[in-house]
Image: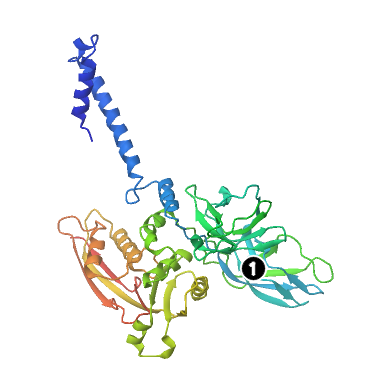
């Protein structure tokens, strides 16, 4: 960037070339104007340079730039996942009640919940059903007035970051028919009734139809209907809380159903839509992956991209499994998966459901429950006199929990003694002369099994700090 002095010299050179200003070039007045103009020019040049940096993912910091990079790479951020939990619905009426799928209920804090599967309840009976924190939105309906390649539909801006799922139906004159999702129109013939999903730089989700080479173009006069569901993400409703029907449903006798709905367990485990900071990191690896499950890291990336809250995950194949347990014919073409999410007791169900959506030739998936192993630290030393000891201990605990805690989303993949020393040093509690610390590790720091997850037991760790 041009220096301040260069700016001043160039300004004086330009202003000195005009007759009326030539005599004032060496005046204090012109000197001050030149300094002021140099500041303005350098500020403008800095802004231009900063704007140019937004063109590169490695230096982009603005959300709008990161979202534009995501759209350029056909990246799909992880959607919002709803909280789920069991509820008991009791039929207090004299006739049976059929509760349709997507029946809406409301909690006391005015949060929406849905029953995703239909259920019949006899008079005086009850049913334990899973409730999801979802809202079914009014469907998007679009009429095709021009038959063009790659027709696009964007979801409303006011549901940005809340969409969890959607279904696409097209009526080509014979009634609505459900079309199938085909990522980037892979393996799609010209007459395939498929659609693709995309993410826009405006932070909106959208769907795109084919071009008659890869995927069918909805013909002129057809109608597209998109049913979609939204969620608030990470919400919690404790056990024993009542829910109310949003609108009345009738029992088999045609009377309004008399139902009591109470949560049997906490409805939680939801997750927010992928943040732009996560997106920025994932975009570096997206081009080599892009929905092609080939290597073990691809499975981990895919599942973390689909399911929120996973703090640890590992995948391995039959070769690694048989090195540990010996040959077994049942291991042929099998992918083993183990993982942990602090707020998701049904992680195994979610993982296998996500993998069921991926067509892989002659491969099977097996969920393996993780083994939890822990280690402790013993930190002794003397902190700077300007620091409060209890504050220093709490700060060190927070850093270690973030780096090695079981539920931490920023946890390290491995435990290295040197890294642990650096993390404690970076807290700056030991900067003054005479301050020092020593760390002793105990327990398991290196996993010995494929399904073993190692994390810190911060409650059993010892922190003995004093002043010099």
Q: Quadrant of the C terminus?
A: bottom left
Q: Residue at x 79, y 66 (%)?
A: 250
Q: How is the image coloured?
A: rainbow
| Extreme residue toward the right, this view | 253
Q: Position of residue 14 (x, y in %)?
A: 23, 19
Residue visible at 20% across and 32% down? 3
Residue 118, located in which quarter of the rendered image? Answer: bottom right
Work out which quarter of the rendered image holds the N terminus and state it: top left
User: Is 163 situated left or right of 137 in this image?
Assistant: left
- In the image, 295 versus 61, the foreground residue is 295
* 463 left or right of 196 in image: left
Q: Is 368 placed left or right of 116 in the picture?
A: left
Q: Which residue is at the front of the view, 64 or 111?
A: 64
Residue at point 15%, 56% (across, down): 433
- The x, y position of residue 364, in whole percent, is 47, 80
239 sits left or right of 303 in the view: right
Numbered disc 1: secondary structure: loop
Tell me: residue 412, above or below residue 1: below
Residue 429 seen from this side: yes
Return the residue at label 1: 116
């Amino acid at each position: 960037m041009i220096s301040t002095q260069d700016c001043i010299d160039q300004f004086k050179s330009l202003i000195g070339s005009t007759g009326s200003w030539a005599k004032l070039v060496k005046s204090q007045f012109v000197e001050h104007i030149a300094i002021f103009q140099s500041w303005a020019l350098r500020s403008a040049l800095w802004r231009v340079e900063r704007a140019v940096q937004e063109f590169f993912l490695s230096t982009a910091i603005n959300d709008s730039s990161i979202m534009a990079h995501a759209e350029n790479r056909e990246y799909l951020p992880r959607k919002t996942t709803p909280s789920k939990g069991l509820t008991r619905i009791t039929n207090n009426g004299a006739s049976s009640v059929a509760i349709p799928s997507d029946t809406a209920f409301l909690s006391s804090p005015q949060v929406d919940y849905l029953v995703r599967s239909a259920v019949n309840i006899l008079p005086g009976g009850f049913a334990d059903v899973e409730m999801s924190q979802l809202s079914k939105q009014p469907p998007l309906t679009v009429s095709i007035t021009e038959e063009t390649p790659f027709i696009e539909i964007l979801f409303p801006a006011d549901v940005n970051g809340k969409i969890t799922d959607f279904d696409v139906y097209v009526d080509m004159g014979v009634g609505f028919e459900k079309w199938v999702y085909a990522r980037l129109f892979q393996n799609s013939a010209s007459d395939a009734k498929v659609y693709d999903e995309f993410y826009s730089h405006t932070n909106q989700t959208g769907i795109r139809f084919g071009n008659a080479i890869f995927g069918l173009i909805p013909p002129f006069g057809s109608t597209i209907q998109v049913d979609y569901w939204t969620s608030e993400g990470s919400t919690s409703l404790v056990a024993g809380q009542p829910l109310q029907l949003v609108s009345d449903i009738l029992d088999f006798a045609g009377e309004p159903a008399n139902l009591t709905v109470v949560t049997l367990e906490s409805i939680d485990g939801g997750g927010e839509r992928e943040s732009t900071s996560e997106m920025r990191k994932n975009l570096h690896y997206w081009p080599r992956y892009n929905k092609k499950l080939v290597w073990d890291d691809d499975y981990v990336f895919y599942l973390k991209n689909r399911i929120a809250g996973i703090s640890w995950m590992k995948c391995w194949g039959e070769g690694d499994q048989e090195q540990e347990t010996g040959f077994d014919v049942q291991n042929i073409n099998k992918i083993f998966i183990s993982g942990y999410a602090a707020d998701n007791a049904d992680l195994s169900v979610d993982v296998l459901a996500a993998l069921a959506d991926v067509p892989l030739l002659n491969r099977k998936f097996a969920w393996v429950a993780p083994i939890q192993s822990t280690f402790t630290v013993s930190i002794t030393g003397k902190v700077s006199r300007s620091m409060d000891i209890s504050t220093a201990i709490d700060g060190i605990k927070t850093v270690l929990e973030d780096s090695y805690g079981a539920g931490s989303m920023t946890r390290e993949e491995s435990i290295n003694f040197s890294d642990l020393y650096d993390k404690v040093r970076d807290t700056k509690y030991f900067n003054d002369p005479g301050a020092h610390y020593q760390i002793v590790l105990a327990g398991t720091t290196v996993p010995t099994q494929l399904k073993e997850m190692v994390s810190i037991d911060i409650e059993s760790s010892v922190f003995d700090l004093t002043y010099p």
